[in-house]
Amino acid sequence: MAAVMAQSRLNADTLTIDCAAEVEKISRWMVDAVGTQLHKRGVIIALSGGVDSSVCGALAVRALGAGKVFGLLLPEHDSSSSSADLGTQVAEQLGIKYQLEHIGPTLEAIGCYRWRDDAMRAVFPDYAAGWKSKIAISGGAQGRVNFFKLVVQSPSGDVFEKRLPIREYLQIVSATNFKQRIRKTVEYFHADRLNYAVIGTPNRLEYDQGFFVKNGDGAADIKPIAHLYKTQVYALARFLALPDAVCNATPTTDTYSMAQGQDEFYFALPHQQMDVALWAHNHQVPAVELAAALNIDAEHAAFIYADIEAKRRTTHYLHARPMLVEPVHEAGG
């Protein structure tokens, strides 16, 4: 019966929410979480210019007031020029204090770009200053094991791609993970300085599928939108009257120097379809029903479900607390 009911709801209204009620619920929760449970005076929000951080910032202002929200703009050498501009626009619309700190020099000092470029030159020996790059996922949506390709663009505009060997893939990802971890270090500096809590900004799709860096953007004191699908976050952005550029932006990684959508880097489908697929999987909707809803064949839908499960298995450790020999109950362990 539950599956039948779920199938009947797999339509344009499946992910519709009462935005006013959701904002009120999150606001009440945030007041209790920050003040009563964590005993903090306010919150830190890193504003990337994307919809998730913008909505979290707006929700924090609704809950706590602009005077208890501090924004950070943390671009680096590969960041889109529009990210800091849009983050600034959001901060000023919300009326919060904010600070821009360019983390590029720190990343240079710890070898982020050097380690990344060394791995890229192992695949493309001509890769040098002036080239651009990204990595792209492939395989899982077609029922195969996921693998990654390195895509590079020469200064003349020529684009090349090759399958990434595992060693070079791990080195590139490890190097670029510095970016999220340094940002979080800056966030917690300001959190300690102000006695504030740090907001984490993953939506449900990212949280469920492990699209975050452990001890990087995955680290936070509160995560206000982890229960909301990306489609629902966009609905809240419009309800909260955030800038049109935020409400209509295509999700990007903003990690590599070439333009890159999140679906190209990690997810099997664009977020609108991926949200529906994840919701359907969570509600035990048969693959054939998902196929009809997304206008794909049943085999492809089954591959999408398998890819969801594969990502949950491989990223489970990202959610895990440190392992102990035995519980330390007095400390909550």
Image: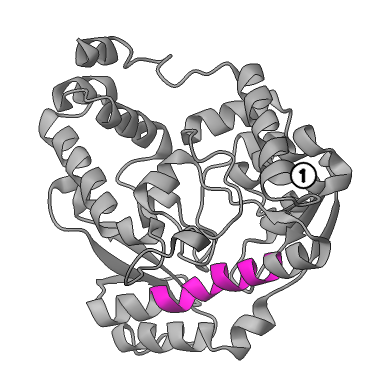
Residue at image location 33% in from the left, 77% down from the top: 170
Q: Amino acid at mark 1?
A: Val
Coordinates of residue 124 in the picture (x, y in percent)? 33, 84
Position of 108 compared to 269: left or right? Answer: right
Question: Is 34 covered by the magenta stretch?
Answer: no
Residue at image location 30% in from the left, 70% down from the top: 161
Within 10 Å of the Cα at label 1, are there few (<14), some (14-19), or many (20+) other Cα atoms? many
Instruction: Locate residue 238: give its quadrant.
Output: top right
Assign the C terminus to one quadrant of the image: bottom left
Magenta span: helix, strand or loop, mainly? helix
Decide if residue 308 is in sight here.
yes
Assign the N terminus to one quadrant of the image: top left
Decide if residue 159 is in sight here.
no
Give the vertical position of 135 relative to 168 (above or below).
Answer: above
Position of 135 compared to 220: left or right? Answer: left
In front of the other: 333 or 302: 333
Q: Which residue is mark 1?
A: 90
Coordinates of residue 177 in the picture (x, y in percent)? 48, 71
Q: How is the image coloured?
A: one colour
Instruction: Locate residue 154: give its quadrant.
Output: bottom left
Position of 64 compared to 113: left or right? Answer: right
Coordinates of residue 41 in the picture (x, y in percent)? 81, 51
Query: How many marks do you count on the picture?
Result: 1
Residue at image location 69% in from the left, 34% down from the top: 244
Coordinates of residue 268 in the picture (x, y in percent)? 29, 46
In front of the other: 309 or 84: 309
Residue at image location 16% in from the left, 27% down from the top: 287
Question: Which residue is at the far front?
Answer: 330
Position of 71 compared to 115: left or right? Answer: right
Q: Please tell me whether mark 1 sits on a helix, a strand or a loop.
A: helix
Where does the magenta region start and end?
A: 173-187
In front of the other: 187 or 86: 187
